[in-house]
Each structure stands twice: as structure tokens, then as C-alpha cells.
Image (cartoon, rainbow, N blue to C red):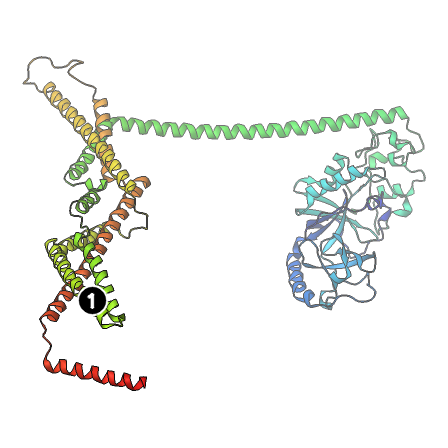
Amino acid sequence: MWVQGHSSRASATESVSFSGIVQMDEDTHYDKVEDVVGSHIEDAVTFWAQSINRNKDIMKIGCSLSEVCPHASSVLGNLDPNKIYGGLFSEDQCWYRCKVLKIISVEKCLVRYIDYGNTEILNRSDIVEIPLELQFSSVAKKYKLWGLHIPSDQEVTQFDQGTTFLGSLIFEKEIKMRIKATSEDGTVIAQAEYGSVDIGEEVLKKGFAEKCRLASRTDICEEKKLDPGQLVLRNLKSPIPLWGHRSNQSTFSRPKGHLSKKMTLDLNDENDAGNLITFPKESLAVGDFNLGSNVSLEKIKQDQKLIEENEKLKTEKDALLESYKALELKVEQIAQELQQEKAAAVDLTNHLEYTLKTYIDTRMKNLAAKMEILKEMRHVDISVRFGKDLSDAIQVLDEGCFTTPASLNGLEIIWAEYSLAQENIKTCEYVSEGNILIAQRNEMQQKLYMSVEDFILEVDESSLNKRLKTLQDLSVSLEAVYGQAKEGANSDEILKKFYDWKCDKREEFTSVRSETDASLHRLVAWFQRTLKVFDLSVEGSLISEDAMDNIDEILEKTESSVCKELEIALVDQGDADKEIISNTYSQVLQKIHSEERLIATVQAKYKDSIEFKKQLIEYLKKIPSVDHLLSIKKTLKSLKALLRWKLV
């Protein structure tokens, strides 16, 4: 609900002097300091603010309105400008307390949110009645900067800039308000401070406002006690000439708090009464100025020019002082950073000195530890990292691959012809034709018997069960290593890619291992030559550039070779390598399952063939009995008799 708005141009010129100050309540404590937070800006000198002591009240009001207003009825009839309603704020769709300022139309009203100060045009449907317990005074108060007003001839652009500038100083910021007076409309005249910054002085410096003219005696509020300086001002018959009273005031620059070289109007140094403009007693002495005299135009211009130059020099001095402070702070920061860098450099130097002392020892110990790991790895077959188990599986599939028996195709053809002959016999209607079909069936039966004999013999010679057991064991071992295979198309390109990858990896590993062996051999030779150098029993000089190689280069080469071999042996394979192995595994598993299905089909045909052969042998050996033949004959006669009876 914090809304920074702009009031109309006319509101900026409502008060150009202290004539709006009215009789003050005896209970009001002027010069009282309040801590407030700016909530709405009307112009460069007028704003609304909330006391920080009423934060809880604002929260309670918001909670109560959110519970009451959604269920409350919209207002009917005439709106009471003195009554508090609930208004639905358009920006956040939340309810806030408001008062009606103006009826714009039948459906539109101008309202002010009394707890924040901003205004908005609302529909009547967005204004509701609220209960009596929420009908209390507003949380936000209207404030005006002490001793300032908006010039009557100020441009609209400058007016807007002044409003924005004041908002940047106080909007949603905690400021201190030193109360000076109260206007007829309840506006609190006060001096605003944000930390050590006098907000009124800042607005005045920017030229968004000017100091008020001295009001006549009848316009100034009456107080019970006035100091002598104020009594003198009240008894003056001829007012002191000010820039604001001059008819040609646009010719001169607006004053920034000074009347002349000897007469100063200071709006920040009030007496204890606290609400009227006073002059120091020495500035009211008769010898300092003549109340009835006229000030020359040249004198006014000179004074004004001096005032402006003085203000300019003061601004430059303040800017230089700020720059000096910033540079001083920067120097301190750089000094601290330099000290930190120096300490870090000392620590690094000490570390390097210690490292140099133990460099050879540390390097040799690290190399020895790596050699221990390398010895263990040399005793382990790492060919599995290059897909050796998959290669072995492919070799098993290629060498003993089971193919479809040649006799199975012939058996399938003859079996189909035999089945067709049986069907023809069943559908035959004539005896002569049936005898021919039976003869053909018997001939086909003999061929089928011979084909079954060939198929059974070929299957018995193929060691089918042994091949199936090999495939099952191979499948189980691969699944234990690689897990579930992914679906994929059968492609010989995958196997070719696997073989190329395997050859490249094997060649790379062989090269690295050879390089490691050569580096270790060179290091051992160096140690052997060094041993002779330090052996006192060996005569002759052995120290020469040819005999003593660069040990740093030898160690560097040896460490590099050992690390490469360990990396190949220990480091996990990359994504590309894993993808090749995974695809190859899927292909191998598909080939195994395909061959297993073929074996299962052949085994099923083998069992059916054995059963057929058994039944055929029993059929051929079986001789029909006389009684069975007579029963058949009797059945035929009965059928013929039944047929004749039906024909008759």
C-alpha cells in the first residue's frame, strides 16, 4: 500500500506563508520529536507519514479488513465524507480504510486511504461499510516541511521533479519529525531529519521550494508566552522588505535563507517556543538597519551574488571534503589489502622453503606408492576393461553356432503333403476315389516315416542339449556382469565398431605399458650409475654430463608413464566407451536368445517326430481281428438299409 503519488498543481500553492497556522491546542507539545515512516508524497514540501509506534495497529487493521470487507455490503445512498469506509485498492486488491473526498459520478468516487495518505478513484461497488470498532482516527498524518512552500510560478516539470526528490529522501524511510505547528486542516508543520540530513534544507538547496514570507501579525497564531524578539516583530508598523513582497521578484534569484549581509532569516534556529520565525536580537537593533529605508537595486544584486557564490563555494567544499574522505577510506582499504598480500606472500615463501627442503623425499615417496599400486595391477588381468568377455562370447557364438537342420525343411514339406492327403480322404464321397486317395496317403506316409528317421538321426548327432547348456551358461555370466540389456536393432555394424574400439584400446594400453617399462628401466639405470659415483671402492671419475642424466627429466617421465597406466587400469571408462560396450552386449545377448529359440523349436519338432514314429510303428504292426471286421460290415449294412428307407 506504499504509494508515491503526485497531487494536483493547485495543491502545491495552497500555502505560501505561515498564514495557515491556527490556534494551537494547549495539550499539544511542540518541538516534540516523532519517528515516522513516509508513506505518500504530495509535493516537494507536503507528504504523509506513519508513526513507527503504530506498526502493530496497521497489521491489526489489515487483518480485520481482510476478514470483514469481503463479506460486507456495498454502500447505498449518499456517501458521508466524515465516515470511514473500506476501499479495495486496485494495485494489490487488498482492503484499506478510506474517506470519500469527492463524488465524481454516480459510480465513481475519489477517496483517500487515511492510513497511508494516497488517493484513488474507486467504483461504488469497491467501497463497503465497516464496523464501528474500525471507525477511529487515521494512522497516517499529513506533514509539511517547516518554513518552506512551493513557488507560485513553479513549472509543472520542476514540480514533479521536486515531488520525486522528496520521495527519494523520505519514502519508506524512518525519519524524525520535530513538530513546530499545526494548520487549520490538521497538517502538522515540522522539521524533518533523516539521520544527520535536514530534509528541508536539501529540498531548498535543489530549488524545489523556497522559504516562506513573514506573515502579518494577524496571521500568526497567538501563544501564551512570546519572547522579546517576537514582540518587537509584532509591533513593527512597516514590515521588513522581503523578496516575496517585491512586485518585480522574478528579476532576482530566489533567496536561500538570507535577507541581506547584516540581516539573516534562519529557519532552523527557532527559540524554545518553537513555532514562529524570530530574528536574533542583535539583528533587530536600530543601528543595524533602518526599517523605513529602501534597499537599492544594486545592493540587492551584489548581496544576492555574494550569497550564491558563498553557497557554491560551500557546495564545492563539501564535495571536496567527501572526496577527501572517500580517498582516505580507499587508502586505508588498499593499505589493509597490501598488508594481507604481504602476509600471504610471507606464508607462501615459508611454504616454498619447506617444500624445497623435502621435495625429493616427497616426490620419491609418492612415486613409490604409485609403484606399489602398479605392481598389484600388473598381476590382475584388465583385459575385461577392453571387452574380452564379450569377445569370448562372440567367438563361442561364431564357432559352435547351431543352424537349422537340413532334414527339417524336407520334413516340413512332406508333413504338409501328408496332412493334405488326410483331409482329402475325409472329404471323399466315392469309394473308387477313396481307394486312390488312401493309396496315395500310404505312399506319403512311407516318405514321412523316412524323413522323420533322417531328422531324428541328424538331431541326435548335433549335441543339441550341450549347445543349449553352453548358451545358457554364457547368458547368465554376461548378465551377472552387465545387468539388464537395452533394446536395440540387430546390426553387424555394432560388432565391427566394437572390434575397432577393442584394437585401438589394446594398442594404446600396450604402448603405455611399454613406455612405463622404458621409463622405469632408465630410472633404475640412473640409480645404478649414481651408486657407483658414491661408492668409494670404485676407482676413476664417473661424473660427467654424458654419464649423469637429468634426474628431474627422468622422474617426470617416469611419473607421467606410471600415472597413464594407472589411469587406464583404474579410472572409469568414458561415456563413449560405455556406449560401445553396452551396444555390443545387447547384440551378443540377442544372438544368444535367437539361437536358444531355434534350439527350442528343433527340440519341439524332435519330440513330435519321436511320437509320430512310435504311433506309426504301432499302427503298422497292428492286425485287425475278424470280429472287428464283421462289426464294421454289420454297421455298413445297417447304414445302407437306413439310406434305402429314407429314399422311399
The residue located at (23%, 65%) in the rendering is: 421
Rendered location of residue 154, percent (x, y): 82, 37
Say whether residue 356 is visible: yes
Rendered location of residue 295, percent (x, y): 90, 28
Secondary structure of the residue carrying tag 1 is helix
Q: Quadrant of the C terminus?
A: bottom left
Q: Is residue 472 above or below residue 335?
A: below
User: How busy is the neighbourhood of tag 1: few (under 14 within 10 Å), some, or many (20 plus)?
Assistant: few
Please state if 159 lies on the left or on the right of 583 as rendered: right
Rendered location of residue 499, percent (x, y): 24, 38
Q: Quadrant of residue 596?
A: bottom left
Q: Nearer the viewer, residue 172 or 493?
A: 493
Please state if 322 lies on the left or on the right of 42 as rendered: left
Q: Is residue 603 above or below residue 174?
A: below
Q: Nearer the viewer, residue 389 or 68?
A: 389
Q: Is residue 642 above or below residue 344?
A: below
**Mark 1: amino acid:** Ile
Q: Quadrant of residue 297?
A: top right
Q: Nearer the viewer, residue 278 or 542?
A: 542
| Count of numbered circles on the image | 1
The residue located at (66%, 64%) in the rendering is: 64
Say whether residue 563 is visible: no
Residue furthest to the left in view is 537
Q: Nearer the viewer, residue 490 or 169?
A: 490
Rendered location of residue 602, percent (x, y): 19, 57
Please state if 343 lies on the left or on the right of 152 as rendered: left
Label 1 sits on residue: 436
